[in-house]
Amino acid sequence: MTAISDTNTKTMDISDSANVYQKLQQWLVNHPIMFPLLLIIIVCLVVGTIAPSFWQMANVFDILRASVIRGLFALGVLVVLAAGGLEVSFTSVAALVMYSVTMLVTNYMPELGFFPIMVMGAIGGTLLGVVNGLLVNTLKAPSLIVTIGTQYAFRGFLLTFIGTALFMNIPASMEQFGQITLVTLTNDAGFEVKLPAYVLVLLAAALLTWFILNHTLMGRAIYATGGNPDIAERLGFKVPQVQLFVFAYAGFLAGIAGILHVSSNRLANPFDLAGTELAVIAAVVLGGARITGGSGSVGGTMLGVILITLVSNVLILVGIPSTWQTAILGSFILIAGLFFCFTDKKQA
Amino acid sequence: MSSKFLDGQLGFLLLVNALVVIASLFLVGPRFVGLYNLQSMAIQLSELGLLAFGVMLAMSAGRGGIDLSGVALANLSGVIAFMLTPTFATATESPLLYCWVFAGFCLLTGLAGGLLNGALVGYAGLTPIIATLGTQMLFTGIAVGLTGGSALRLGFIEPLDDFANTSVLGIPISFGLFLAIAGVLALFLKYSSYGVRLYLLGSNDNAAKFSGIKVKRMYLITYTLAGLLASVAGVIIAARTSSVKWDYGSSYVMVAILIAVMAGVKPEGGFGRVICVLMSAIALQLMSSLFNFMAISNFFRDCAWGLLLLIFLFASKVNITDFLRLRPSPATK
Amino acid sequence: MAAQPIEQALPTTRDSSATAFIELHEIHKRFGGVHALKGVSLNIEPGQIYHLLGENGCGKSTLIKVIAGAHPASSGHLKVNGETVSDFSSIKALSLGIETVYQDLSLLPNLTVAENIGLSQQLVKSNGKLYRKLDSAALIQTAKQALRIVELPVTPTFLNTQVDRLPIATRQLVAIARAVAGSAGLVIMDEPTTALTKSEVDNLIAVVRKLQAEGVAVLFVTHKLDECKEIGGIGLVMRDGELVCQCDIADLSKQRIGYLMTGREIEQGRYRAPQQAGERLLTVNQLGKTGAFSNVNFSLAKGEILGITGLLDSGRNELPKALAGVEPASEGTIQLNGRLLSLHQVDDAVKAGIGYVPEDRLTEGLFLDKPILDNAVMGILDKLRGQLGLIDKHRATEHTENMVNDLAVVASDVKAPVKSLSGGNQQKVLIGRWLATDPQLLILHGPTVGVDVGSKDTIYRIIQQQAESGMGVIIISDDLPELIQNCDRIAVMSDGRMKTIVPVEELTEQQLYTHIASGNKATQGVAL
Amino acid sequence: SAEKEIATVVKVTGENWFTRMGQGVEAFGAETDGVKARQVGPAKADAAQQVAIIQDLIAQGVDAITVVPMDPSALEGVFRRAMQRGIVITTHEADNVQNTMVDMEAFDNFEFGANFNQKLAECMGHQGQWTSFVGSLGSLTHVQWADGGAQYAEQYPEMELVSPKNESFNDANRAYEQAKEILRSYPDIKGFQGGSAIDVIGIGRAVEEAGLIGKVCVVGLGLPQDTGPYLESGAVQYISFWDPKDAGMVMNILTNMTLNGEEIKSGMDLGVPGYNDIQVTQGPGEGIIVRGQAWVDVDVSNYKDYPF
Ligand SMILES: Nc1ncnc2c1ncn2[C@@H]1O[C@H](COP(=O)(O)OP(=O)(O)OP(=O)(O)O)[C@@H](O)[C@H]1O
Ligand SMILES: Nc1ncnc2c1ncn2[C@@H]1O[C@H](COP(=O)(O)OP(=O)(O)OP(=O)(O)O)[C@@H](O)[C@H]1O
Ligand SMILES: [Mg+2]
Ligand SMILES: [Mg+2]
């Protein structure tokens, strides 16, 4: 019947009337996740050919380790983005949580185990996230602008009322957790490369997020809201509830990220993390999530994160001064933006 | 196009300004409204104000419009001008010529950067956030790359320094320029067909397309204007600090947005008045100086800015659907 | 006409409240100043089929949105199965078994077919709570069943297709599938057949019968009387937000319904004597747009009014967009006064002297938040330039006030936002804007959709006036009386081709309908 | 007014370094009568904010401003204007500023850099690859230390300087990442010379995690308490620093002397340890440069003696 014949012809007149190039296009359109993957491969090949020392396990470990914090942030941003919002306050959330929790524990219960500390961080982050959610719901303003506001408010609060001093004497449990290693290699140069255990946290978070997005009603509700809030509302999805959830979840991940940041750095510095927002959003966008909401996948986001980490870590190897990193990231974002615009047009 | 001059927003802003001034008189004393302080505030105001105008234009054009790349472009234009100018004029022999050439290159860079933003938003159809986020990093990155991250000193160039700091009839020249630009911009937005179309476009870009407004070109022009304004800010910054650096004023992005929102510019587009932006910029400058006078922690000021932004959002009535989808999603009709 | 006695020509509707599935009592609905529902009372009984008839903008969609819990009623109350429902909401309606196919289909563009069909049920199961596991298996099952009912394929590829990649007809079927998926007590369909072919419609009717047999009530909103008659059931006629008749559809003649809907005998009388073709204005040659229409040829004389009609996917919506440069044609030529036009954007068309009043005035036509003034003069800004090339506000205001008077727009002040106007007046402002550009060719797409009787008449007279003064006019509409009353010739499109162009004098509605029906596609019922 | 007001403007408020400096400023204010001394600074390391603060201080009509510039060149203009209005301007860690009356350096920056490298060279056995870090290329003194170190190293042909002046942007984590990169790119690296106060922390961590303690030497600027753990673990051998408290004090002393029109001569004793025999030289502009010998070398044996 017409409906189907239509759909078929749609796909057909692409497939048969198309040369390889168009097929590739179409394939990319259907597999947006391939975009960051391709970029990663390109970067690796370029760097690898210029500097063979790039091909070593050490690199993989380092990139994984360096991806953890950014990865956690990115998952939060992904969820908010999928629901059609935008969030830039997560670094402030993380900083506020990590510094106050660490300080609290150090001063009053230095013996506390790592798990309870992590939980405290998660709860703290979630609460701040809820504040974001409530504000977005009540102010009915673009969430980018709302969270810019809270970003400053949270940071200002932290530095005005809680403290500004960097301190090293963090709780033993945190320090130890940062040290736990999964694998230790001794590389040809004779020094050890460790894969820290906290990469597992990112793994767990990724799995959790994937489950929420793909196997819960909330997940579908998130995409529905991102796709078209009015219709979602009409079909019985409680949009405000979705808003609240996504921001709370982003806060939750930010809180955990903060705690991990402290225990891996073995110091608590309230000035840390600020200013890394854009790189994170860049990662999510590179991973194929539309800034206009309703799309995005965990896999893509993780690839985006790895891509960003790759770019900001390996430039020294190929002798590009680190000063050009920002420019390269910027152009990557634009490329990604253009690419996905193009695929959108293809679909329409 | 047609709205009475003194609307609620403007009245409100005037009130805020009055209150701040009165408060400062009590808290700091007449010194606060002394000529010198007024001048120094005016000088500080100019660069921020120009960036805020850029944000206002982008927001008014709708489609989730915003310009995150303003400061980056301002600094980049300074850097590029610094590198190119010496090939045409030397500061020591012909300072005046040097300054004009410098300004010229700044504006050219601003023009180019603005065109890039405009092309990305208008013709390529990128969401303004992504486009200007990308260009922000790109501009910053180029500036860092070119300068290796360090500041470049212009040194003392008389005319440039005068432009930034000396006053005619008590009005600092740079501020005078800023006021002039504001005036022209206001007139232009209210009485030119571009202005009328801009606000129509902002309020419904689909209808704009159907009624023959050249939407793409409108975005191009709008973001180019924003770029130009940014580069003027770049000139003022360079003149004021007699140097150029990639990360100067990294706190301006948010403050510019704050000024715009305080001024009642609707983030979903279609509304925004120059006079209001001017007033809210002044209000912010007054408060910030007041804080400095009272030696209030600068951290607290950040906090206060954040809260202010939220409060003003609360005050302004914003349409719910626009923050859920920054661009109206294709109707299922 | 407010206190018009409701005709109760139906035994079933007496003392039915005992058996009624849904009872509405004195429902009112206001949007800002628009009073869309003015005290509607209605009983809906199990296994009964209803046809909600009425002019555009009379409140049909609003009524069903209230029943479906999408809009809270401004006043009045609503009972389901005898008990009054408090805080009625979409999810509540769904859980009570009220399923809806909205006029805009209300599909989620970025979700798959399966999800669009199956999710509502899962929501109902968890009664709105989102912190639940998604039962993918059940979702697929529901989707498959529903798709089978409407005879769509159940292949995984189709199930996982994103809805915004489907053609409109398929989307409509998906929306219907969603409605019949659940175990419904009432299925509401707001103009479900606009895009369907005859066979699809027949299939739909079969579905409806099945539902009826299962004791499900069905409420159709439609403009297509033949469909109603074929299906049978109770006709509900609305006029300007009021329910003016509930009676067996079989007992209602077209004329009768026309009278009930409009409150006056619809004079088939034409507005003007047919014109003998004057000087050639527009020549369209081999015009085509991939996926929409192809080799369309026709011409238009100065002062002539040409009607274009056809099914929704016949290309009748894309052709005018091509002529207006909104979505330019991909092949063929357009000549105006013998001058060859190249239309890449609307502005080209405007400059060439073509005006296009789009179909949806709310999203495509007007800038609702902006003053009438801006909306009215935006087309002629360049003409309003004063010294320094700046716009002369006085002349702008003057111009707008003249327009408001000429077109009898009911408005307090030209600085009031257009959204504060009533539907008809909004439409007048929109037309006024285009007349201001004094085009040689004016294209009106559904000029009176959502416009009430009074304004309709005014708008027709304006159109005629312009034609008299030598302007060429094209009206795209599926409101056949409208076409017959206003046009000199009527072109019928189907399958992207221009099938026939018929001079109107030798044409009745019935004949026109058969023209639409003919063509290789079988067709659905005649439009009223 | 009877009481003179001296304002000290630092790069950024809150960091331990400048908190310590604030103590010096307070102490000075306390023990000097007729002078009101306070310290202010921006919330963010942003030159624009520092300029704004100074501009407002001028407007407030303070008698003297002494500044630790975020970015010296960005301040020339505002300094000149301040002095035109008869306000005394002095600086610290900015011996290239023209518009200042006195610039105070705790020591000769090249000597300081050389001192780092001397320690490093000893530790490395005067051979092998080494590299240097700076907070940012913008911060002059860091660059001077790196250059001073490089100059000193030239006398040992076996010592090879690789990818010099890595920017840590005053972020321990960034320094850490950079150090790891270096370790991978130059497997035979033997020594690191840190620039900003947190560089050694980041580098130390990298060395520790790479299990290279004892194989690689790390020296640089650092604060005893912050660097303590790494001194203990042996990842960091030496840190040097000058006591920001004393610096803050001396800045204000010199500023006060300038206010009172007292002459500042070589050999003077300012009564602060490390500044008992100051060297005065002509600066790039009108002003003079005052140097002390106020640096402290610290290793695991004695870092506990310094409570900051
Ligand atoms: N969301 C809304 N805001 C303001 N007015 C509205 C809204 N929805 C409907 N209206 C107005 O309410 C009246 C009834 O609209 P409704 O959509 O019910 O008409 P309808 O009978 O469905 O017309 P059609 O046959 O064209 O679908 C119209 O005047 C319309 O302009
Ligand atoms: N949002 C609004 N704000 C203020 N007044 C409004 C608004 N919407 C409608 N009105 C006014 O309320 C009155 C009733 O509106 P409504 O749409 O029912 O008129 P109508 O009978 O449909 O007229 P028309 O035949 O032109 O559609 C009109 O005078 C209109 O101007
Ligand atoms: Mg309807
Ligand atoms: Mg109406």
Image (spheres, coloured by chain):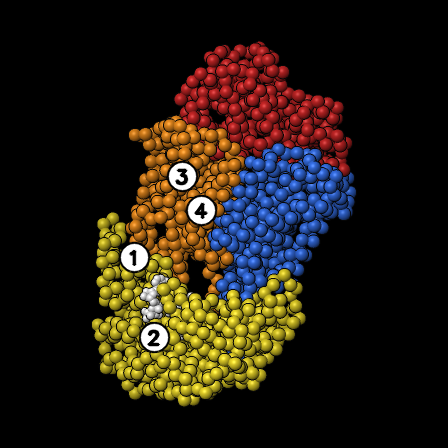
Chain colours: A blue, B orange, C yellow, D red
The amino acid sitting under disc 3 is Ala
The amino acid sitting under disc 2 is Ala
Q: Residue B78: horizontal and vertical position, in percent?
A: 44, 37
Same chain for mark 3 and mark 2? The answer is no
Residue C333's place in the image compared with A260, above or below, is below
Q: Position of C74 compared to C444: left or right?
A: right
Chain-order first, disc 3 or disc 4: 3
Q: Could you give the CA–CA distance between mark 1 and mark 2, rounded to whole angstroms? A: 31 Å
Q: Position of C388 compared to A323: left or right?
A: left
Residue denoted by label 4: B312
Q: Quadrant of residue D56?
A: top left
Same chain for mark 4 and mark 1? The answer is no
Sort mark 1 into few (<14), some (14-19) or many (20+) by Cα contacts within 10 Å: some
Verify CB contact (< 8 Å) between mark 3 and mark 2. Answer: no
Chain letter for mark 4, please. B
- Residue D183 appears in view: no
Kindly report which numbered mark, 1 or 2, lies closer to the viewer in this rendering: 2
- Residue B307 appears in view: yes
Say which element carries label 3.
helix
Same chain for mark 3 and mark 4? The answer is yes
Residue denoted by label 3: B283
